Image: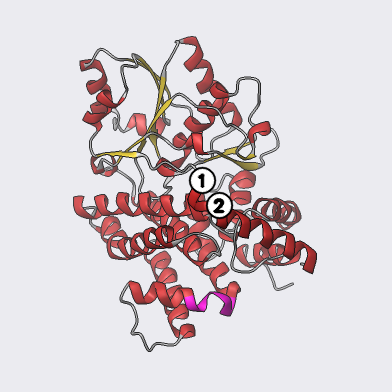
Amino acid sequence: MNFFKKLIFRTYQFCFKIILPILPYKDPIILNSLCEVPNALENKNKILIVTDKAIRNLNLMLPLEESLKEKNIEYFIYDGVVANPTTDNVKEALKIYYDNYCEAIIAFGGGSPIDCAKAVGALIARPEKNLKQLKGILKVRKKIPLLIAIPTTAGTGSETTLASVIVDSKTHHKYAINDFVLIPKYAVLDDSVTETLPKNIVATTGMDALTHAIESYIGRSGNRKTRKDALEAINLIFQNLEKSYDIGDRESRKNMLIASFKAGRSFSKAYVGYVHALAHSLGGKYNIAHGFANAVILPIVLKEYGKIIYKKMHKIALYCNLIKEKTSYEEATMLLINKIEKLNEHFNIPKSIDEIQEEDIDQMAYYAYKEANPLYPVPVLWDLDILKRMYHIIGNFKKI
């Protein structure tokens, strides 16, 4: 990457970091039980619930539905959200909202239903716009309907972020809508809804949260609060993710919800990095689950960053009691990357993504480049050639 581009990108990121403390972030109000939701609806009597068919088939929403019925609150369900929510999903949910004169939105599920619900809110706030016109930063700027997020996975952190990530149904391009008004007013951290999660979802969403926290911490933005959230999230994940996967006890599930929330709160302010940029293009092109993509890509990108992240990786390892103070920066970094790889191995997550087609790499690298630069305060700036090479490594192609 040439000097002038680097200068422009780093200046943009520096300015963003300077104004970070005065930006209008509002942490969601935490509720600990589904039973608290009706009282949080603020006298709204017609509600749109956005979810997916898997959640509905598992009957996870029944306690919520019963609570709403007890309070005579009418609700309408859209359960068509797919793994990487599309513009068509958003339009279908929006139609139900308008057809039934709804007044508020409940997002029930993982990151996909929550992202879809945020996008519905964005279009309600800006009916004269389409989703593509709202892509980027601070394009909504008007209050959305009351939004309550109920995460059923401990990973995405969408219940606390300002981002909605959507796939264009026609082009398959995945992009983000970022605005403070998209932060849910309430986040319900009820571990009972995570009881029946399949093991692969526990694993990949947990690795998603780990990616959020690590990318937030090693980036060049953030502040004392975001770094604290990131470290606490990483430590909680290392202590609880395997236990949540192997045993699924209530304590570990609750701790993973807290870790996901903290990681989400951290990266919503400090942003992420090239792991996410590379993963988003894979999700848009091949419909690969975001957490799975992040899990595979994370150790690959960390290795590629090299010495520039050694000091911060040492701090992470030290905070998590994985090393001694005198451990070298390089040794700490390699130990931490090895721990991540061991987690993936324990969860049967492969080292590469076989779906990648070589003819798609140029386009995906372009999308990843445009997503990351200049927005993401990455440890080191990469050009298109490096991003292409990363896709070759991720896809386990022969060395180019």
Q: Residue at x 57, y 76 (%)?
A: 308
Reply yes or no: does residue 307 show up in magenta: yes
Q: Residue 1 in the image: state x and y as whole percent.
A: 76, 67
Q: For this rendering, which residue is in front, 45 or 363?
A: 45
Q: Are marks 1 and 2 in contact (CB under 8 Å)?
A: yes
- Residue 204 seen in the figure: no
Q: In the rendered image, which quarter is residue 26 located in?
A: top left
- Tell me the number on the disc at residue 129: none
Could you tell me which secondary element the residue under label 2 belongs to? Answer: helix
Reply yes or no: does residue 396 show up in magenta: no
Quadrant housing the C terminus: bottom right
Query: Circle 1 is placed at which residue position?
Result: 23
Q: CA distance from mark 1 to mark 2?
A: 6 Å
Q: What amino acid does circle 1 point to?
A: Leu
Residue range in magenta is 306-311
Give the prevailing secondary structure in the magenta stretch: helix
Q: For this rendering, which residue is in front, 357 or 194?
A: 194
Q: Residue at x 45, y 10 (%)?
A: 100
**Above-or-below relation of 284 to 3:** above
Dot 1 crowding, Cα within 10 Å, few <14, some 14–19, many 20+: few
Q: Residue 45 in the image: state x and y as whole percent.
A: 33, 13
Q: Residue at x 54, y 70 (%)?
A: 302
Query: Circle 2 is placed at which residue position?
Result: 19
Q: Residue 306 in the image: state x and y as whole percent.
A: 58, 77
Could you tell me which secondary element the residue under label 1 belongs to? Answer: loop
Q: In the rendered image, which quarter is residue 63 located in?
A: top left
Instruction: Give left or right: position of 331 versus 86.
Output: left
Q: Residue 241 in the image: state x and y as whole percent.
A: 31, 59
Q: How is the image coloured?
A: secondary structure
